[in-house]
Amino acid sequence: MATLVPIQGLHHFAYRCRDAEETRHFYEDILGLPLAHVIRAERVPSTGEYCPYVHIFFEMQDGSYIAFFDLGDNQGAEPSPNTPDWVNHLALQVGSEAELREAKAKLEQAKVDVVGITDHGFVKSIYFFDPNGIRLELTTRTAPAAKLDTYKAHAHAQLEDWIRVKAAAAQ
């Protein structure tokens, strides 16, 4: 199959939020991501469905966004009943281990429960939840580019091995 078109990067990833102001406070005042755009509408543009909402966007340094929909009913998204809460998460990159330690200290000062610093061998990370129950990871790369290139070179073989082991276990 031919490739689609070159994907240039992430524009935004959107979640549901319980309360736009609570979410703004967390992402802007605590994480430092500026509120960059707000869309308020009565109908969903893609479907025409009536559903009053506000769509808020927080900008990261690379120009991409984390976005949220407040549907006006003070309800957050329900967690997936068949997925552990550590699986679905959004990982955001910071520039260094020193910045990761600084972020952890500032989050803890803001009374946010933080897990880590966890060393994954190629990155170090901290984990915490936003007010909507969304798990966030702040991470910094620790592996040199050559090591990352080695991971890429072996990725297909490792996935094929996982598929084989998984299929054997299912039999």
Image: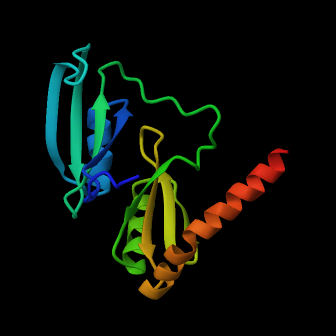
User: Viewed as shown, does residue 167 lie left or right of 128?
Assistant: right
Q: Residue 115: horizontal and vertical position, in percent?
A: 56, 60
On the picture, is 153 further left or further right than 14? right
116 displayed left or right of 131: right
Which quadrant of the figure has residue 23?
top left
Q: How many marks?
A: 0
**Drawn side of residue 79 relative to residue 77, left or right:** right
- Tell me if residue 153 can be seen: yes
Instruction: Please indicate, yes or no, whether residue 122 appears anywhere in the rendered image.
Output: no
The part of the image, by quadrant, that contains residue 39 is top left
Residue in view at x 19 percent, y 53 percent: 34
Residue 19 in picture, x, y percent from top left: 32, 31
Residue lying furthest right in this view?
A: 171
The one of 118 and 32 positioned closer to us in this rendering = 118
Q: Position of residue 16 (x, y in %)?
A: 37, 32
Residue at 47%, 79% in the rendered image = 148
- Residue 18 is situated, as x and y percent measured from the top left of the image, at 37, 29
Say above or below: 162 vs 39.
Answer: below
Look at 56% across and 69% down and name the residue there: 155
